[in-house]
Image: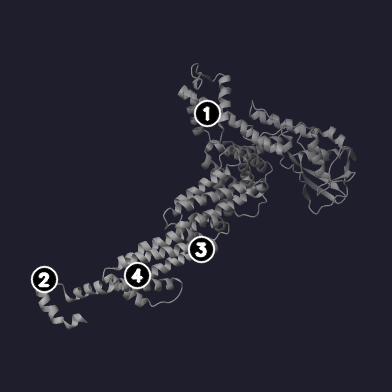
């Protein structure tokens, strides 16, 4: 107003004298000195503004345009920073410090996170509406520090595992977003995330009661964690690596068992009769399995069990699809190199070669003077490729023995210098049988065949007589009789009746046998994979490891000629693919010294020399 009254003065006299300030500037100066800088007025103005802001923070409505013009005035007079901003930030700090404490005590973590996000939004809105732009950084920092920064560990301890267990994707994404704004937020989150995976996964792996679902649970857990990284943690490299590292740690907490269970899981998926998956789904499952397999240190344990199951699938013709088998092999080859799968590939080759040999054998049989009544199919298995089976001597009927000899002559005529060893435990046959109801065909194992053929000769036999005639080992024989007389398809009757076969039981042929099918498969009573079998597979792996260690030591010593113990051990750790204890390495080194592959230095016992 003063300026408009003295407009003429301002435009003429003041303009001509460059030293004089304009009436507008003079007015502002006087207003600042006498009114705004007056202690009482300033105190009441600033307190009034702060009170209004606090009211608004507590959810009441205030006159924003009044606040905007007041703070605008302070900015124009250049007293905004000194007389308002400092006090404002101190107040804000105090308010949010108290609120942060309260939040942590009263609310659960998801509510806290949403609350913090809402507060940050409100403060940003305040800056746009009436605060000065320069206040933005310190204000937001203050809110983040008091509501989040001070409580990072508490929030994660209290809530992270619940959020992950319940798969609360929205809250996890929010958590990541908020923590990425606070200093040290992501490294803290990363540490907690790693620990969570280790403890949750450790529980899956180290609880023997959970063994039968372990692999499925691991796959689900991995899927869930992948999803969290993908959709909540912005695919952050550090989080992906921490997850891999955590998986590797907990899966190897319990040696050998996970590897064995993964092999069995793959077996269950590749076995025929697994109708649950299409080819594509099977592929996907196998890919996921490979990811888990990568984390395992003792891959040779996996190979041993995988080989045993693969042998069963191939010999009984139980494999779901050759393509799936081949695909799994190529994955393993890609992961562990050709040496790892050479034996497994050998098994497939054997099966294919056997087919060709059988075609030639059939032609050979047609040209024989006296054709045989029995059709014989032989699988020729190369000893080193397949699992070792304990040979069992049994008494075969003369027709079978004769046929075996014919095949032997035929095969050795083609391949001289080879040795054939028959494996009766793996054989099976189809028998024609006549019951009252009519003719049937029985699909049975070789042992079941030997027992059933006895009933062509007589009506009733005791367990001991059958044992003497067939020569089948006692435990095996009991299981065989049980499958024939106590199973679903009872072609024999047992006296006295009962579920288990005891010494002294008697058996006779069940003429009244009825079944809706013409060809009946009589399953053998599967021996539950005994603990001995598991132990023997693991023992075999252990034996192989010994040889690998020996070979590695000799390789290194041959190259280096002289090495200290520590260097040799560290070199071994680099070369060996499986986990070993220093004690075991020491034993192998001792054994090699005893066998004169290397020797200790006379002066310094810690040095070794290679002995050529």
Q: Which residue is mark 3?
A: 103
Q: Please give the count of numbered marks on the rendered protein.
A: 4
Which mark is first along the chain, 3 or 1?
A: 3
Identify the residue position indicated by label 4 in the image.
Answer: 131
Q: Are marks 4 and 1 in contact (CB under 8 Å)?
A: no
Among numbered discs 4 and 1, the one appearing first in the sequence: 4
Secondary structure of the residue carrying numbered label 3: helix
The residue singled out by tag 2 in the image is: 18
Q: State left or right for residue 214 relative to residue 47.
A: right
Rendering coords of residue 438 (x, y %): 85, 50
Earlier residue among tags 3 and 4: 3
Instruction: Determine the CA span between mark 1 and mark 3.
Output: 61 Å
Disc number lying in front (1 or 3): 3
Q: Nearer the viewer, residue 537 or 372?
A: 537
Q: Nearer the viewer, mark 4 or mark 1?
A: 4
Label 1 CA crowd tier, 10 Å (few <14, some 14–19, many 20+): some
Among the two numbered marks 4 and 2 on one chain, the one whose residue lies closer to the N terminus:
2
Residue at x 54%, y 44% (from the top left corner) = 248
Asked whether, in this view, residue 72 is left or right of residue 332, the answer is left
Which residue is nearer to you in this view: 447 or 458? 447
């Amino acid at each position: 107003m003063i300026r408009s009254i003295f407009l003429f003065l301002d435009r003429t006299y003041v303009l001509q004298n460059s030293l004089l300030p304009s009436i507008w500037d003079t007015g502002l100066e006087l207003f600042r000195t006498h009114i705004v800088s007056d202690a009482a007025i300033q105190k009441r103005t600033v307190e009034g503004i702060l009170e209004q802001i606090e009211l608004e923070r507590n959810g009441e409505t205030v006159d924003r345009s009044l606040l905007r013009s007041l703070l605008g005035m302070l900015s124009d007079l250049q007293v905004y920073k000194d007389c308002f901003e400092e006090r404002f930030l101190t107040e804000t700090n105090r308010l949010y410090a108290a609120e942060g404490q309260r939040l942590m005590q009263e609310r659960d973590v998801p509510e806290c996170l949403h609350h913090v996000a809402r507060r940050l939004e409100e403060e940003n809105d305040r800056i746009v509406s009436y605060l000065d732009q320069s206040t933005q950084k310190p204000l937001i920092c203050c809110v983040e520090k008091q509501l989040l920064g001070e409580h990072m560990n508490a929030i994660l301890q209290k809530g992270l595992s619940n959020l992950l267990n319940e798969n609360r994707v929205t809250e996890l994404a929010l958590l990541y977003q908020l923590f990425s704004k606070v200093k040290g937020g992501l490294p803290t989150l990363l540490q907690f995330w790693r620990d969570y995976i280790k403890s949750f996964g450790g529980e899956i792996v180290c609880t023997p009661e959970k063994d039968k679902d372990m692999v499925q649970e691991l796959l689900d857990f991995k899927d869930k964690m992948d999803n969290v990284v993908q959709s909540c943690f912005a695919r952050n490299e550090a989080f992906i690596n921490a997850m891999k590292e955590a998986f590797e740690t907990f899966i190897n907490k319990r040696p050998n068992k996970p590897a064995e269970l993964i092999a069995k899981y793959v077996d269950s998926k590749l076995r025929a009769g697994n109708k649950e998956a299409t080819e594509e789904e099977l592929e996907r499952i196998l890919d996921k399995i490979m990811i888990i397999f990568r984390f395992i240190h003792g891959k040779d344990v996996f190979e041993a069990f995988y080989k045993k199951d693969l042998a069963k699938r191939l010999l009984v013709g139980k494999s779901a699809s050759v393509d799936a088998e081949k695909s799994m092999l190529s994955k393993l080859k890609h992961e562990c190199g050709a040496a790892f799968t050479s034996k497994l590939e050998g098994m497939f080759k054997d099966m294919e070669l056997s087919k060709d040999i059988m075609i030639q054998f059939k032609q050979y049989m047609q040209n024989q003077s006296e054709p045989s009544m029995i059709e014989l199919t032989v699988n020729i298995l190369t000893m080193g490729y397949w699992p070792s089976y304990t040979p069992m001597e049994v008494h075969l009927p003369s027709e079978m023995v004769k046929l075996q000899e014919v095949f032997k002559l035929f095969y050795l005529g083609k391949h001289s210098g080879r040795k054939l060893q028959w494996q009766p435990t793996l054989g099976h046959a189809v028998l024609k049988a006549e019951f009252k109801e009519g003719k049937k065909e029985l699909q049975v194992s070789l042992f079941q065949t030997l027992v059933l053929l006895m009933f062509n000769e007589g009506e009733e036999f005791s367990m001991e007589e059958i044992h003497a005639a067939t020569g089948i080992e006692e435990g095996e024989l009991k299981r065989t009789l049980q499958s024939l007389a106590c199973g679903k398809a009872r072609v024999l009757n047992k006296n006295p009746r009962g579920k288990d076969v005891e010494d002294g039981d008697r058996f006779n042929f069940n003429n009244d046998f009825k079944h809706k099918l013409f060809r009946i498969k009589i399953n053998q009573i599967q021996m539950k994979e005994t603990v001995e079998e598991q132990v023997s597979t693991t023992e075999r792996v252990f034996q192989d490891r010994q040889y690998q260690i020996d070979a590695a030591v000799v390789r290194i010593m041959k190259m280096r000629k002289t090495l200290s113990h520590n260097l040799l051990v560290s070199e071994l750790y680099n070369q060996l693919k499986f986990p070993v204890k220093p004690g075991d390495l020491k034993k192998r080194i001792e054994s090699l010294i005893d066998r004169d592959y290397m020797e200790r230095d006379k002066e310094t016992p810690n040095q070794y020399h290679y002995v050529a």
